[in-house]
């Protein structure tokens, strides 16, 4: 007699999809930490080049291209963190 345990052990499609989504964003967040550390160092080292007090346009023009790219990398990391938190907080329902 062979029992069918696949139906009991297999999670529903909704649960597995949400778990995979959460795992994907978690891995992206963790792996994206390495470029974010480098981006933080670039912004830290280039901070003295920024000009303050001369207007917004002058301040934006004083930023170099690597500063903008570093800021975009850090913004992407914040996006991955928010997506991870959002996917982890989505309630999942198991069917009986």
Image: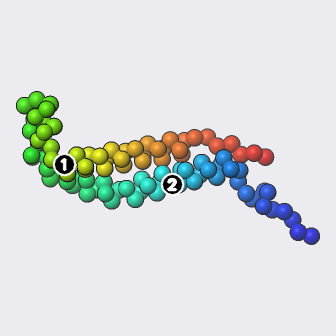
Q: Secondary structure at mark 2?
A: helix
Is residue 43 toward the left or the right of residue 35 in the image? left
Q: Secondary structure at mark 1?
A: helix
- Quarter of image, res 56: top left
- In the picture of the structure, the residue carrying the numbered disc 1 is 65
Is residue 73 toward the left or the right of residue 94 in the image? left
Residue 6 placed where, x, y %? Answer: 78, 61
Residue at 40% x, 59% y: name it.
31
- In the picture of the structure, the residue carrying the numbered disc 2 is 24
Residue at 84% x, 62% y: name it.
4
User: Real-space Cα distance between discs 1 and 2?
Assistant: 30 Å
Residue at 75% x, 45% y: name it.
95
Dot 2, how many residues are within 10 Å of its Cα: few (below 14), some (14-19), or many (20+)? some
Residue at 55% x, 50% y: name it.
21
Is residue 20 toward the left or the right of residue 10 in the image? left
Residue 55 placed where, x, y %? Answer: 10, 29
Of all residues shown, which one is farthest toward the bottom? Answer: 1
Mark 1 or mark 2: which is in front?
Answer: 1
Dot 1, how many residues are within 10 Å of its Cα: few (below 14), some (14-19), or many (20+)? few
Q: Is residue 26 above or below residue 82?
A: below
Q: Is residue 7 above or below residue 77?
A: below
Of the 4 image quadrants, the one containing the N terminus is bottom right
């Amino acid at each position: 007699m062979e029992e069918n345990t696949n139906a009991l052990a297999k999670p529903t499609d909704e649960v597995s999809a949400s778990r995979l989504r959460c795992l994907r964003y978690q891995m992206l967040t963790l792996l994206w930490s390495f470029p974010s550390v480098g981006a933080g160092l670039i912004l830290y080292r280039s901070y003295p080049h920024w000009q303050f007090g001369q207007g917004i346009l002058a301040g934006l023009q004083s930023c170099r291209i690597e500063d903008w790219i570093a800021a975009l990398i850090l913004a992407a990391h914040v996006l991955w963190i928010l997506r991870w938190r959002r996917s982890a907080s989505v309630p999942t329902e198991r069917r009986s």
